[in-house]
Image: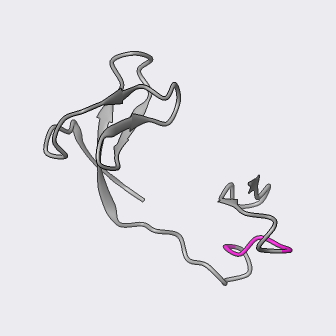
Amino acid sequence: MQMCPWCDEVYDESEYSKCPYCSGELVRDTSERPFKNCPNCGGVMYWDDEWACTNCGETIDSDEDDCDGTIEG
């Protein structure tokens, strides 16, 4: 995985020779999704069949409705 220095999107460099977001091959998902504040580190948790923190990896097994709000994309 590689992060584009221009748009900060992450993509698989084994599938694309240049950033697929900057070139228009892929479009960012900007739909709203629920988030939860991580009780372990204060990071952001997203729902994917369980709450998972993008910072520390903490997981919480609760419902998707157990969120602190919604965030765009």
For residue 24, which quarter of the picture? bottom right
Q: Is 55 left, or right, of 1 in this rendering?
A: left
Q: Is residue 19 magenta?
A: yes
**Which quadrant of the figure contains the C terminus?**
bottom left
In the displayed structure, would residue 2 be above or below residue 36? below
In the displayed structure, would residue 60 be above or below residue 17? above
- Highlighted magenta segment, given as a residue range: 17-21
Q: Residue at x 81, y 67 (%)?
A: 14
Q: Residue at x 39, y 36 (%)?
A: 52
Q: Is residue 73 magenta?
A: no
The picture places residue 55, in percent across and down from the top left corner, at 53, 30
Q: How many marks?
A: 0
In the displayed structure, would residue 63 be above or below residue 38? below
**Which quadrant of the figure contains the N terminus?**
bottom right
The picture places residue 45, in percent across and down from the top left corner, at 38, 36
The one of 65 and 49 positioned closer to us in this rendering: 49
